[in-house]
Image (cartoon, helix red, strand yellow):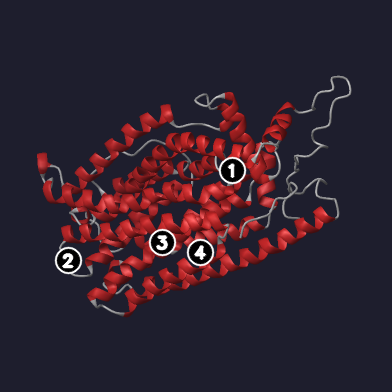
Amino acid sequence: MATSTPAKAIDEKSLHEDEATKMPADPMLAIYLEYASQTPQWKAHHTSRLLRKVDLRLLPLLIVIYLLNFLDRSNLAQARLGTLEKDLGMKGTDFNLATSILFVGYITMQLPSNLLLTRTFGGLLACRTLLGVVEAPFFPGAIMLMSCWYTRAELAHRIAWFYAGSSVANMFGGLLAAGVLGNLEGAHGIAGWRWLFIIEGTITVGIALIAAVFLPNFPATSKWLSEEERNFAQWRLVDDAKETDTASSVSIKDGLMLALKDYRLYIFILFQHISLLTQTFQYFFPTIVKTLGCSKIATLLLTAPVWFLTFLVSLGVTYTSGKTGDRSIHIICLLMVSCVGNIIVVSTLNTGARFFAMFLMPLGAVSAYQIIITWVANSFPRPLVKRSAAIAICNMIGNASNIYGPYLYPASEGPRYLAGGAAVAGLCLAVAGLAFLLRLIHIKENKKLEALENDNTIREGDARGVGFRYVY
């Protein structure tokens, strides 16, 4: 079966009248049926009006929070170009350990720690671990929240805007680090890299306080929408999934078991895990760019145009992915681009060729990942508890790759980083292969759904709603 979720399809059977009251058994389904009967023009008008409100309320905050989230994670890469390693007595693979240790905390639980600053390498590891713990709930929670507001066709482009925070963070982070390391080194007796952590941490705390007040919850409980808008927002998702959400009748344990029993989950876990490995170079990007022979400030400035182009490409490919309903072909093409970039980096020390490759690496891998996380959310639509579990599991195990991924780029391998670049090139091919496999699986599952509908057995127990099809 495509899923083990009891579907509550929208049809006359679900809307049967109670003999005593002559009223629909489920008032919300009656409202949904009323929306379903409206003209396409009416639906388009109300959708446009609703999305304007939701986009303005949800996306700016999520983008800024993720920008700061990623900035706090990746600022170690910029700080390395300062006196970080010298001040803390770091040597050998200590920097790799400091990079990967964040993800030990990232895949566990939650505890405040972002502004802690100490003066030893051991203290740095403790801070990075606690930072990962604090950040752990945000990314999967944000993806799940957006999937509760946007249809499958709308979600990919919105996730692109959200994930653009990482590209902007890499771009803005390089510029900020250049300014801080170039102008605040030694100010008030504090090293430039410490000022970098202090400034970014302070901004993060301020934005967090604002988000706590203004970030919306779910459509059914959002008081900033009218009752009609709340109902319409819920109906859009029901219409997209072809079934109502049974979350209220599914316990957390049952939702988790539904996710674990879906064989596709394990393929998506591997898919997301390897995809994140193809992006490991991000945490060493300034160091890799430095191999071009530029000064530390010029190196930080050179990273900005790379991430700006990645940001633009991400918006373009996720828009076409959402419009066409395609996931796999987009991902395959993008991973081929990143693969070529990695091959060029390890094949030559020519400055022009390597700088060109610096554009290709994130342009392909980062853009593809935005479609991948959208595909995960799209592939487990109902119930909400199952979707939440699937997103969290994929993100948790996926990010475990960042625990050992940084060791692909030890300092001793520079400037060519042959082992890391060659491995990532191969991993790009593996992700492309998994995208094609999932395409075939979803085509097969859609044929099963069509056969069930033709046999009039679609509403039996563990089936999707009538008309639902998996995207691929």
Q: What residue type is labelled 1?
A: Ser
Q: Distance between the residues labelled 4 and 2?
A: 33 Å
- Along the polypeptide, which appears first: circle 1 or circle 2? 2
Q: Mark 4 points at which residue?
A: 331
Residue depicted at x 37% and y 66%? 361
- Along the polypeptide, which appears first: circle 1 or circle 3? 3
User: Disc 4 vs disc 2: which is toward the camera?
Assistant: 4
Q: Which of 43 and 458 is in front in this view?
A: 43
Q: Name the residue under label 2.
A: 294
Q: What residue type is labelled 4?
A: Ile
The quadrant of the rendering that contains the N terminus is bottom right
Element under disc 4: helix
Q: Mark 3 points at which residue?
A: 279
- Along the polypeptide, which appears first: circle 1 or circle 4? 4
Q: Do the residues labelled 1 and 2 touch (CB within 8 Å)?
A: no
Residue depicted at x 16% and y 57%? 297
Residue 78: x and y in percent read 25, 54
Element under disc 2: loop
Q: Name the residue under label 1.
A: 388
Q: How far apart are marks 1 and 4 (CA)?
A: 23 Å
Q: Which amino acid does label 3 sit on?
A: Gln
Q: Do the residues labelled 2 and 3 touch (CB within 8 Å)?
A: no
